[in-house]
Image (tube, coloured by chain):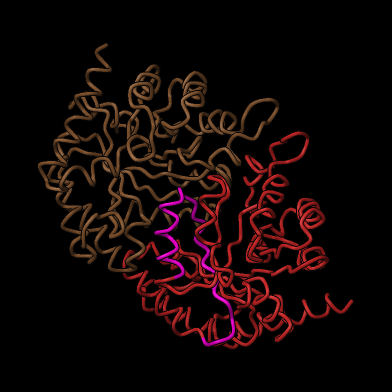
Chain colours: A brown, B red
C-alpha cells in the first residue's frame, strides 16, 4: 500500500510538475455569454484535455458544482470519470463536522465520487479529521493559513505568542501517522508560509493564491518545496487563460510548469 | 423586511417551542434492515409529518444527503419542498471558503435549495461569512464551541488568556449588522456555554448535543435563553425515537417541547 503523500511525491517525480489545477468554472467568470450548465461542462472537459499530462492533481471546488444542485453533483461525478489515470483528485470541499457526520462525508467524497484527498477545516478538532485519514491511501489537506484577505481574522490570533496557524500546523503533524496529512497554506502570505514550512518539514503543502489572488510563484515554490512537497494550485489563471481555447489553457499550464521546473533547477 | 433573528424569535413566540429538529437519517442508524434511499426518504417524511407544528426549525445535515451523491441532493430538495410553511430551514452545511467561492455556496444553499440559514466555520474569517449575511432575511450560525469530544483541540486554545471560542464569539458579534448572525454552541460544554452567553447577549444560539451526545437539556435551555434565543437541536433522539413510528417520533418531540416549556416557566 502506498500512502497518499507518497502517491503525491511519485506523481511529482514522474512528470516533474508541481502544478495542481483547480477546476472552478462558473458563468460569472466568462467574459462572454456562456451561462448554461452544458457550457460549463464543455469548458471543464476542455481544461482536463488540455492539462492532464501536465498536472499533479485536479482540485475541483465543490461550491461550483453544488450551485447547480443535483445536476452539479452529476457533473462532478462525470468530470471525475473523464479524468484519465495519472493526476490525483483533490476534493476542495473544506468540510469539518463531528465524527459520525464526517463518516458520512467520507462516503460522499471518497466512496461515491472517488476522490483521493480532501481539504478540511481544523476548527472542530481531530474527530472531524480522523475518518478521512484512516485509509493511508487517501489524504487530507488541513486549512492552516489560507490565501484570502480575511484569513488573518482568526488564523493569525496569537496563542502563547505564536499565531493560531502555527498551532494548527503542529497539531496537524500529530495526525500524520499514516503519511496522508497535508496543509493548505496560501501563496499570498509568504512570511507565514516560511514559518509553517520551517515548523513542519514533512507535510505536503497545497498552496493556493497564485494568479488571480496575487501570490508570488517563485517564492512559494522555493519555500514550499524546501523541505517537503509544495504543490502550487492555479485555478482561474488556467481555467480562463487567453481566449479560453484548449490551446490557450494548455499554453498557460505549460508555462506554469516550465517556470516551476526552472525555479526548482535554480 | 424581517431579519432572520427576528423571524426566529417570531416562530418561537408563536408556537412556544425552542426545538430544532435535526434531520440526519442514514442506514447505519436503523436498528433493523432499512438501507435504501427510498426508505430514508420515507423516514424523513415521517419526521416532518410528526413534528412540523412542534419545531421552530429543521436542520438537515448535508453530509447525510451528499453520501448518496446527486440522488441525495434531489432528496434534500424534495424534503425542503414537503416541509410546510412555519418551521425555518437551517442548512447544517458547515461551509467556509474564500469570498468568491462563498458566493457560489450562497447560490446552492439559499437560491437552489431555499434554506433560510446556514451553519458556517469561522476559520477563514469575515469574507467567508459575508456573502451569506448580506440579505438580512437569511441567517448564519457560526461554529463557536461545538459539541464533539475533540472540539477543545483548537477551540479552547488560549488567546490573551481567553479561549479561542470567546474570541470567535466576539468577532461574530461584529458581523451581526443585519441581525442575522447566530452561534453554534454545544450543550456538552456548559461552562463554555455560560461564558459565551454572558459575552454575547444578543446573538441567537443553536445548541446541539442534546440526546445521543449527552448534553444537559435543563441547563442548556436556561443558560441559552437567559439573554437571547437558545434553540435546542435534537437529531437522533427524535429521528430514531421508540419504534421509529410517526407516533413515537411525535411523542419524543412533544416531550422535548413540554420539558422546554416547563423549564422556561420556572
Residue A81 vs residue B150: left or right? left
Instruction: Give the residues in magenta.
Output: B84-110
Q: Say above or below: A212 vs A231.
A: below
Q: Nearer the viewer, residue B64 or B30?
A: B64
Q: Say above or below: B255 vs B67.
A: below
The image quadrant that residue A229 belongs to is: top left
- Total numbered badges shown on the rendered structure: 0
Q: Is residue A76 magenta?
A: no
Q: Say above or below: B27 vs A21.
A: below
Residue A96 vs residue A257: left or right? right
Q: Quadrant of the N terminus of chain A?
A: top left
Residue placed furthest toward the right: B266
Q: Residue B186: x and y, percent?
A: 68, 57
Q: Say above or below: B211 vs A1.
A: below
Q: Is residue B100 magenta?
A: yes
Q: Residue A13: x and y, percent?
A: 22, 23
Residue placed furthest toward the front: A32
Q: Residue A38: x and y, percent?
A: 18, 64
Residue placed furthest toward the top: A266
Amino acid at each position: 500500500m502506498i500512502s497518499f503523500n507518497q502517491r503525491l511525491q511519485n506523481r511529482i517525480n514522474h512528470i516533474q510538475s508541481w502544478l495542481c489545477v483547480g477546476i472552478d468554472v462558473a458563468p460569472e467568470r466568462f467574459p462572454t455569454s456562456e451561462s448554461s450548465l452544458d457550457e460549463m461542462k464543455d469548458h471543464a472537459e476542455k481544461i482536463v484535455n488540455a492539462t492532464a499530462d501536465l498536472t499533479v492533481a485536479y482540485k475541483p471546488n465543490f461550491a461550483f458544482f453544488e450551485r447547480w444542485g443535483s445536476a452539479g453533483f452529476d457533473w462532478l461525478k462525470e468530470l471525475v470519470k473523464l479524468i484519465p489515470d495519472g493526476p490525483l483528485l483533490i476534493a476542495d470541499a473544506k468540510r469539518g463536522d463531528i465524527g459520525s457526520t464526517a463518516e458520512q462525508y467520507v462516503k460522499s467524497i471518497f466512496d461515491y465520487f472517488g476522490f483521493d484527498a480532501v481539504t478540511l477545516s481544523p476548527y472542530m478538532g481531530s474527530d472531524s479529521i480522523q475518518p478521512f485519514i484512516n485509509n493511508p491511501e487517501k489524504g487530507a489537506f488541513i486549512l492552516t493559513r489560507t490565501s484570502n484577505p480575511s484569513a488573518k481574522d482568526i488564523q493569525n490570533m496569537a496563542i502563547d505568542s505564536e499565531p493560531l496557524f502555527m498551532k494548527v500546523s503542529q497539531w496537524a503533524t500529530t495526525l500524520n501517522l499514516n503519511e496522508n496529512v497535508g496543509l493548505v497554506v496560501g501563496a499570498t502570505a509568504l512570511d507565514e508560509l516560511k514559518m509553517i514550512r520551517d515548523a513542519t518539514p514533512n507535510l505536503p503543502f497545497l498552496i493556493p493564491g497564485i494568479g488571480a489572488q496575487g501570490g508570488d510563484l517563485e517564492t512559494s515554490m522555493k519555500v514550499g518545496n524546501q523541505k517537503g512537497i509544495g504543490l502550487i494550485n492555479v485555478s482561474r489563471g488556467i481555467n480562463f487563460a487567453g481566449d479560453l481555447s484548449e490551446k490557450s489553457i494548455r499554453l498557460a499550464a505549460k508555462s506554469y510548469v516550465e517556470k516551476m521546473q526552472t525555479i526548482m533547477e535554480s
